[in-house]
Amino acid sequence: MLNYLIKKYNVPGPRYTSYPTVPYWDLEGFSTEKWINTLKKSFLESNSKEGISLYLHLPFCESLCTFCACYKRITKQHNVELLYIEAILKEWNLYINLLPEKPIIRELHLGGGTPSFFSPKNLKFLIENILSKTNIHPKKEFSFEGHPNNTTHEHLQVLYDLGFRRVSFGVQDYDLQVQKAIHRIQPLKNVKQVTETARKIGYESISHDLVFGLPFQNLDKVINTIKITETLQPDRIAFYSYAHVPWIKGVGQRGFKEEDLPSGEEKRKLYEKGKELLENIGYSEIGMDHFSLKSDSLYQSMIHKKIHRNFMGYTSSSTQVMISLGVSSISDSWYAFAQNVKTLKEYYQKLENNELPVFKGHILTKEDLFIRRHILNIMCLLETHWQNSILQENFPEIIDRLKEFEDDGLLTLKDNQILVKEEGRSFIRNICMAFDLRMMRKAPETKLFSMTI
């Protein structure tokens, strides 16, 4: 039965860090002015209650990892750091001048690229200047992504002193053949040292990113990676499915052959075995791709149904507003999305002209907001409900699609609600696609998304 379901549902699909997904944004109905208006509205609704999230995209990497589909800039020239920091601070000042009151920072995350590409001194300068114009929420969550090969004790100490208590390290896989194929060679000793250093300094949540479905991976290699991970005991584990999207310009995913990748059925076995091993050693599955120890805040937020999902993935704190700074980053006001320009040249140029570096976005309709809430509930809580049969009366096509999942034993549909069964966890992206009216009405003509399985 499982093999049948894998073949049936292994189709291209979004990961739903947003709805509508980026390819379905209404670009013609968007303007920077409209974005600013929605931001001000949402900010006034939520800042004093829950604060805001702030994401800083630091795109530089010293070498290209061929499994990565994120925006990055490859260079070994560290003289790029200050120029980029000055640009981010200018962008932040533009937002500060627009906001009707002083922002309260609930969540701050440094993503990449490789944030630890930047020197501790420059990171300190950046964060101190960012925070100098804000208030800090008493339940703040500050986190950053670090590369095990170049995150130093000084990086960890400087950011800890600034309030950071969570760090994520990209591990992917410990097998040397796999590491060579994805151009991400890092010895176990580096991961062990940086993990233990972070723990000694006082970081409360240490996360390791693992990836299944990589070239040359097999069951034995995944088992070995998880056995090693058990010895290091990270608080969280992101067990991601490798997103093979070689058609996207600049992702560098042609360093290996298609036949080097596990097939859909083989890839699902890697996940199922990995999940089994992680649960056996004390980790609980959180939503999609994520596992945590019961002592971690992510698990606690799941138990109390406060877990949230945005462009940063799953978070234990929910905010209505997320302002993202830096090239290519995407901001979210709940009522709208806005993405920054995708090249450094354009980014610097717009800021020199005192313009927000936004180049596209989407203003959500009432229908979008309705669907977004249900997709978010499913991704975070594995359930959702609605009132007065509104879904049956207005969107019967969604109900028809959900009934198919019910027939396949993946969810329960009754009393104006759906509950995803344990068997349905592996197909959560597909279940969310049943709600995706924009994709339903206009099927993509070209490849847009990675495979769901």
Image: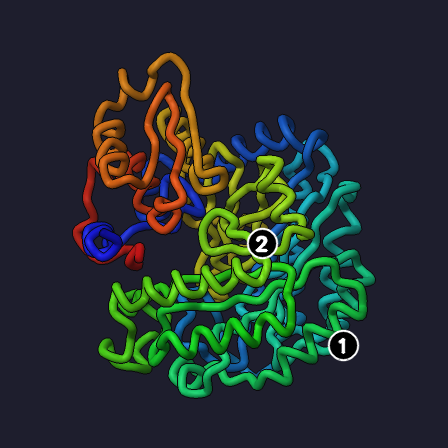
Q: In this image, 54 relative to 112: left or right?
A: right
* Residue 333 % position (x, y): 53, 37
Q: Secondary structure at mark 2?
A: strand
* Residue 344 % position (x, y): 50, 66
Depth order, front residue of 184/97: 184
Q: What amino acid type should be assigned to the residue bearing mark 1?
A: His
Q: What amino acid type should be assigned to the residue bearing mark 2?
A: Leu
Judge whether 405 appears above or below 273 on screen.
Answer: above
Mark linked to residue 153 = 1
Judge whether 265 appears above or below 107 on screen.
Answer: below
Q: Are marks 1 and 2 in contact (CB under 8 Å)?
A: no
Judge whether 409 appears above or below 392 on screen.
Answer: below
Q: For the residues marked 1 and 2, what is the alpha-carbon distance in whole angstroms?
A: 26 Å
Residue 85 seen in this snapshot: yes
* Residue 43 % position (x, y): 62, 32
Depth order, front residue of 220/252: 220
Q: How would you rate the neighbour count of disc 1 (Cα within 10 Å): few for under 14, some for 14-19, many for 20 or more?
A: some
Mark linked to residue 48 = none
Q: Quadrant of the C terminus?
A: bottom left
Toward the front, the furthest residue is 280
Q: Secondary structure at mark 1?
A: helix
Residue named by callout 2: 325
Sequence-wise first label, 1 or 2: 1
**Residue at the (40%, 78%) spot, across then down:** 220
Q: In this image, 432 relative to 309: left or right?
A: left
Dividing the picture into quarters, in which one does residue 237 lie? bottom right
